[in-house]
Amino acid sequence: MTEQTKTRFPAPLYAAAGAGDIAVEQLRKLPAVLTELSERASASLRDYNEQAGTKAAELRDKASTTDFVALRGNAASVATSFAQIAQDRAVAAYTALVARGERVVGTGVVEAAEVVNADIETTEEPAAIEAAEATPAKPAATPKPRKRAASK
């Protein structure tokens, strides 16, 4: 059996570990964020109620003067460029998650996995040998000849 000198997990595993690390980090901040959002929401709600009527009238006027044909023509090209930007950001985020996961997992986990694998190998080998010794060897069975189907 060949021995690997360096064990490396697949990139998706590192990405999952990185995402988990970010999730734990953000969950620790959650109580403070909830308090802040609650305070901001109550203050903003009063302001929005006062401005809602005037904003609705402005939007109605703007909708009546908008050139929807030109807007529709620009939508396809803008959507394509946004999709490219989103794809680039997704690749960058995935790469960052993989790098973070590699730091989180670190070499300690690799070493622990090697120890566990070695323990499994040493535990399974004696069991297989004991099982082979416990059952007596049977003579090789000769196959029965097949019956031919009767032709009509």
Image (cartoon, rainbow, N blue to C red):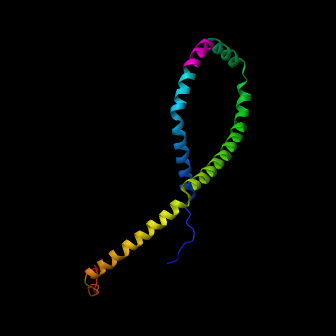
Above or below residue 12? Residue 113 is: below
- On whether residue 51 falls in the magenta region, the answer is yes
Magenta-colored segment: predominant secondary structure: helix
113 in the magenta segment: no
140 is higher (above) or lower (below) than 47: below
Which stretch did the figure color magenta? 42-52
Residue 49 position within the rendered picture, expressed as x and y whole percent measured from the top left: 58, 14
In the picture, the quarter occupied by the C terminus is bottom left
Seen at 55% across and 26% down, the residue is: 37
Q: Residue at x 65, y 12 (%)?
A: 54
Q: Residue at x 30, y 78 (%)?
A: 130
Residue 111 or 12: which is nearer the viewer? 111
Residue 80 quadrant = top right
**Image x and y of residue 118, in percent:** 44, 70
Left or right of 95? Residue 112 is left
Q: Looking at the image, which is closer to me, 65 or 1?
A: 1
Task: From the viewer's perspective, tell me whether residue 21 is left or right of residue 59.
Answer: left
Q: Nearer the viewer, residue 9 or 141?
A: 9
* Quadrant position of residue 74: top right
Q: How many marks?
A: 0
- Looking at the image, residue 116 lies above or below residue 95: below
> Left of 68 or right of it: where is 119?
left
Q: Residue at x 57, y 52 (%)?
A: 15
Q: Is 88 placed above or below 121 here? A: above
Q: Looking at the picture, tell me which residue is in the foreground, 55 or 39.
A: 39
Q: Position of residue 61 (x, y in %)?
A: 69, 15
Q: Is residue 63 left or right of residue 127?
A: right
Percent of width and height locating residue 145: 28, 85
